Image (cartoon, rainbow, N blue to C red):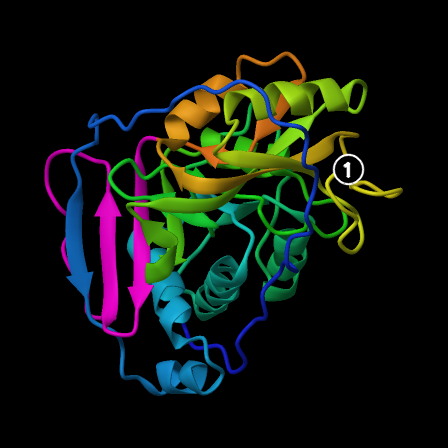
């Protein structure tokens, strides 16, 4: 992406804790070796004045990933899902610059969040609202963590702002013909840790939390997310309520997460669970940013993409 003189700050604040429930039964989630074929290409970082200015703001690494994503995957006439997060904000800004310069034409953006809609409006990107019938050619997004080998991602760990929605974000990503995540190298892992957010019905949420706790007893705690501050396992007097009216439970893993696909499958069988932050998409690619350059990994068979000097 063309250089942004100031690096966008992260769109999300840190996550608040949610709710620990007494532990019960235990289900073992075993690792499976059904990993997709992947292509990997190294792309060296840019030494342009634009990248130098981004570096001065501490964001050159993610900026290169954002620029590469737009330059490589987006062409004129596309309908593009606009992700949420620091790298996505940079990609949106760069898309706007490319549209104003005439390098891209007739691109329509479909935002995954209020934040990405605001950023796109500022950048001058024409917008449309997501509908179930939306035809989306391509989408990009940030991710909290990506599972190495499967490219299954977790989103939604960070506290949402305003009318943000995991459901809306996943709907846009799943509707896209192709998806690219942009992450730093420490977010692409073979051994996963941290949390997985789960949206649940507010009625009888405690019973749902207990069922989730039963799935991962000994390996995780379940906390209801508070809307403000650290309110303890039950979410305090002001639990977070999404714009759709759901509560957010954070499954905080105290042991490595063996398989995100198995976690998602098990959560999907519980009646009180509405959705969760696990995203599994084909075709999907990940642009991984590090100080030494960029690497791209995808779950497409056939030919690897050509490396580009950004």
Q: In which quarter of the image is residue 212?
A: top right
Residue 220's x, y, as percent?
53, 35
Q: Which residue corresponds to the image point at 28% horizontal and 45% vertical from the top-left? A: 190
Which type of secondary structure does the marked residue at label 1 adopt? loop
Residue 166 in view in this figure: yes
Q: Name the residue under label 1.
A: 234
- Count of numbered circles on the image: 1
- Let me know if residue 174 is in the magenta part: no
Which x, y percent locates residue 146? Answer: 37, 45
Q: Is residue 127 above or below residue 206?
A: below
Q: Which residue is drawn at 30% across and 84% down?
A: 48
- Badge 1 crowding class, 10 Å Cα cut-off, few under 14, some 14 to 19, many 20 or more, is many
Residue, x 51% and y 60% (percent of image)? 92
Q: Give the residues in magenta.
A: 282-310
Q: Where is residue 154 in the image (x, y as percent from the top left)?
A: 47, 41
Viewport quadrant of the C terminus = bottom left
Residue at 37% over, 24% down: 29
Q: Quadrant location of the N terminus?
A: bottom left
Q: Where is residue 176 in the image (x, y as percent from the top left)?
A: 43, 34
Relative to 84, 13 lies left or right? right
Residue 284 falls inside the magenta stretch:
yes
State whether residue 189 is above or below residue 37: below
């Amino acid at each position: 992406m063309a250089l942004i003189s100031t690096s966008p700050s992260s769109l999300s604040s840190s996550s608040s804790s949610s709710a620990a429930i007494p532990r019960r039964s235990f289900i073992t989630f075993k690792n499976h070796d059904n990993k997709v074929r992947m292509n990997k290409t190294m792309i060296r970082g840019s030494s342009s004045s634009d990248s130098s200015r981004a570096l001065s703001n501490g964001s050159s690494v993610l900026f290169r990933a954002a620029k590469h994503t737009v330059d490589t995957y987006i062409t004129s006439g596309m309908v593009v899902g606009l992700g949420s997060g620091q790298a996505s904000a940079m990609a949106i800004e760069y898309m706007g610059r490319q549209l104003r310069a005439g390098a891209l034409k007739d691109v329509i953006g479909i935002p995954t969040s209020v934040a990405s809609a605001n950023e796109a409006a500022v950048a001058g990107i024409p917008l449309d609202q997501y509908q179930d019938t939306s035809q989306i050619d391509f989408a990009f997004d940030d991710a909290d963590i990506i599972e190495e080998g499967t490219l299954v991602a977790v989103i939604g760990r960070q506290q949402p702002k305003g009318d943000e929605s995991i459901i809306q974000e996943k709907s846009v990503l799943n509707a896209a013909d192709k998806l690219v995540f942009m992450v730093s190298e420490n977010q692409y892992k073979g051994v996963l840790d941290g949390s997985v957010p789960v949206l649940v019905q507010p009625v009888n949420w405690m019973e749902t939390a207990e069922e989730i706790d039963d799935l991962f007893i000994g390996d995780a705690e379940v906390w209801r997310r508070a809307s403000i501050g650290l309110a303890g396992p039950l979410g305090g007097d002001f639990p977070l309520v999404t714009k759709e009216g759901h509560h957010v439970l954070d499954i905080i893993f105290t042991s490595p997460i063996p398989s995100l696909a198995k976690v998602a499958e098990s959560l999907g069988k519980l009646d009180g669970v509405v959705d969760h932050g696990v995203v599994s998409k084909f075709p999907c690619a990940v642009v991984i940013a590090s100080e030494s350059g960029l690497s791209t990994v995808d779950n497409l068979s056939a030919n690897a993409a050509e490396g580009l000097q950004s």
